[in-house]
DNA sequence: TATGAATGAGCTTTCATTCAT
DNA sequence: TATGAATGAAAGCTCATTCAT
């Protein structure tokens, strides 16, 4: 799944391929993306593509993981969330979310990739790849939720999986809405504050 | 768009076609759905399909609208939401949402159809059909939000479009989560109560 | 072939159908013309269309014949060609050709129809209709050629069928060229004079 | 456009494909030709066909260019036309035309292909291919006309584009007529002499 | 390690024509 | 006399994947 053959390539060529694939997936979504276009843009042969990756889905998962990793790297270390009180928790989360959104706004292709996420998961060919990516991204939110519960910032009266789903759903909706607003850098913090406020209202302990 | 030719068919055959299409769209989403499979299941010729409907998207929109309409009919009249106080508002919403979820759980294919919604909207061929359906479904939530704001149950400090997006996103996530739980009829009310509580926390006026 | 059923229709409806068909055939040629579009434009049912005409080709031939007839009517009576000498013959022909071209320029749809003629004759379904039209139009040229031969304006040393073919081919090429020039009414006579000069050079007796 | 993938095939298979396509295009014209029949006759898969050629039009242009090239090769080098007087010019042209017609009579399918030419140009899908072929064939006539004007064999008092159109139209008509006569090799020279005489009469300077 | 030729199943859509009513 | 529902055949084209080299 991971693709040791791909990783043996000289980094510039890896990047050329990933860049071409990201461009294609971001522009057309998983299903409508054409491997033919990808290999053409990347300048490699079709045989090579299938030598590096098992399938279209494998390529997609690789691209998504790499891009997510890059985003995380750009965001810097995740701040500790389980030290302090609830108020601190939310302020740290808000700060982190703001930075994340700024990074996402700066990488419209990655944003498009994530937006197409639910779209992609429908395709039967996609299932094998899905696990890999979710295993990479969900633990992070799970940890944050657990930390929030520890400091009393997050309600404990509903199943964690539900909290996760809801936060994910809200995040997706907010991202989408945010992108559709073409937000300027100035008003962003206030907007993010509102958004976090809504999430907080949803998952904070009742009263 | 409406499809007068289709509506002239004897109801049993209409149902056979709609059932086949619903099955296919629910199982594969808009893009991956195969008209060939639909006509095979429905037992009609390809020419007939295109005699009844203008395109794949037209068929999809017809199926979705019909199913939505059926769901609404089963739910009965939408209760008035702008009479009474905030507490009443939320209790009425919760009651309605509970009934809606029960109906949805009883129609897993419709649920799948709605779940595939965002998936479908990606396809360029789908755009023409999209408007028709959204015009049918979004006003309802908008009205509910407006009523909630009127009685002080819903915050007015964020743009209505954001409220709409968030509620839609939360609802989608909750539906998905709910379906994955294979909920029994007994514990459902309590779960719904939690879900509504989360929505309420998100969109109720801060403190 | 002729279509007595069609001729029994009230003239306004006949015209509506012919107009719709002319529009379609002129715009798309015989093969690409869609009967569906024709009946839609004409406001009749498909069954009626096939009640009035035997086939697509039958409709086409009817349209072409009618339009040709209309053109001829607008041109007025064909002047006698076999009275006088060769010079008179050519001057009468030139005058007539000029008037014909003027009429054709004023009816771009008919011009388009004629232009698509050779295109249409390729289609196998078209053969039955072809005879009817050619029988209507070729005798005229044949008569003119015969008259020309009688007065010594047209060579007699080649088979009449060849003369006919060549004149037809030249005429078609000239018409096409003329249309592509978007001729203004002023310079038209001089141009026509050149064209007739070329035809004359081709079919006049050598030296 | 050129089709490097096709040219890499072993020549026998290239010929099998070209032969099948020529047969189909000659028999049915561009629009009515069926790629399905071509691939069936050629014994290749549909995917292969689209691997070799970009589109139906691309295939057509390839077939036409190849056949034209073969014809030209069989004709041998084009004789110089601008050396000598008008009489020489016309005798050289006549000789060349005679040889061309003989070659064309020996390749009835190519003749049919050329005959279907105007038919093909109507199809919108055909436009891209048209340029390539016309650029190959029209310069030749243009050069001949220019040479004829240089030696005083061709009139200069009408636009060159008109001369081109007319000669093309006459040639097409004559070819068609000639084919319909099923000419025997014996009487051909005399007939060609008449034909050239007619062209000469049309485009020679008016005494 | 890399190539690219080859494939076949699949897609949506159009159309002239027939025929029961 | 008129309708329009129904159809089947056909169309051009795309694509992820395989595999011999």
Image: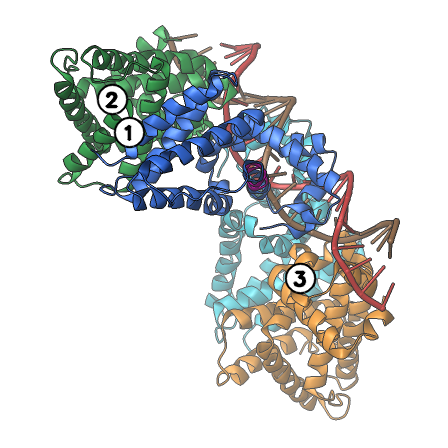
Chain colours: A orange, B cyan, C green, D blue, E red, F brown
Q: Are marks 1 and 3 on the same chain?
A: no
Where does the N terminus of chain C fall, quadrant-wise? top left
Q: Are marks 2 and 1 on the same chain?
A: no
Residue E16 horizontal side relative to residue D43, left or right? left
Task: Work out whether B148 lies above or below E15.
Answer: below
Number of other residues with Cα within 10 Å of mark 2, as a class: few under 14, some 14 to 19, many 20 or more: many
Q: Which residue is mark 3?
A: A40
Residue A16 horizontal side relative to residue A136, left or right? left
Residue D100 on the magenta span = no
Task: Work out whether C3 lies above or below A170.
Answer: above
Taking the spot 74% from the left edge, 87% from the top edge, the residue there is: A78
Chain of residue at mark 1: D
Discs 2, 1 touching: Cβ within 8 Å: yes
* Magenta range: D65-71
Q: Which residue is mark 2?
A: C204
Secondary structure under tag 3 reads helix
- Return the residue nearer the eye: C179 or C30: C179
Secondary structure under tag 2 reads loop
Give the distance between the C-alpha atoms of the residues marked 2 and 3, in whole angstroms: 62 Å
- Mark 2 against mark 3, which lies toward the viewer? 2
Task: Answer with the quarter of the image where residue B122 lies.
Answer: bottom right
Q: Can see residue A163?
A: no
Chain of residue at mark 2: C
- Return the residue nearer the eye: A158 or C38: C38
Q: Which residue is mark 1?
A: D201
* Prevailing SS of the magenta stretch: helix
Discs 1, 3 touching: Cβ within 8 Å: no
Give the distance between the C-alpha atoms of the residues marked 2 and 1, in whole angstroms: 8 Å
């Amino acid at each position: 799944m991971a693709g040791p053959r791909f990783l043996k390539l000289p980094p510039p060529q890896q990047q050329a391929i990933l860049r071409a694939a990201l461009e294609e997936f971001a522009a057309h979504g998983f299903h409508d993306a054409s491997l033919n276009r990808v290999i053409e843009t990347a300048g490699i042969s079709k045989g090579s593509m299938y030598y590096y990756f098992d399938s279209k889905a494998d390529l997609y998962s690789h691209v998504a993981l790499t891009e997510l990793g890059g985003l995380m790297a750009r965001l810097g270390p995740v701040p500790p969330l389980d030290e302090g009180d609830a108020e601190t928790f939310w302020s740290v989360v808000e700060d982190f979310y703001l930075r994340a959104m700024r990074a996402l706004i700066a990488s419209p292709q990655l944003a498009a990739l994530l937006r197409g996420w639910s779209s992609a998961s429908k395709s039967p060919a996609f299932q094998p790849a899905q696990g890999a990516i979710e295993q990479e991204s969900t633990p992070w939110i799970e940890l944050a939720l657990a930390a929030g519960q520890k400091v009393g910032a997050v309600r404990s009266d509903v199943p964690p999986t539900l909290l996760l789903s809801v936060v994910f759903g809200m995040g997706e909706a907010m991202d989408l809405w945010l992108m559709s607003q073409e937000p300027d850098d100035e008003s962003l913090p206030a907007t993010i504050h509102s958004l976090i406020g809504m999430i907080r209202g949803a998952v904070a302990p009742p009263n």
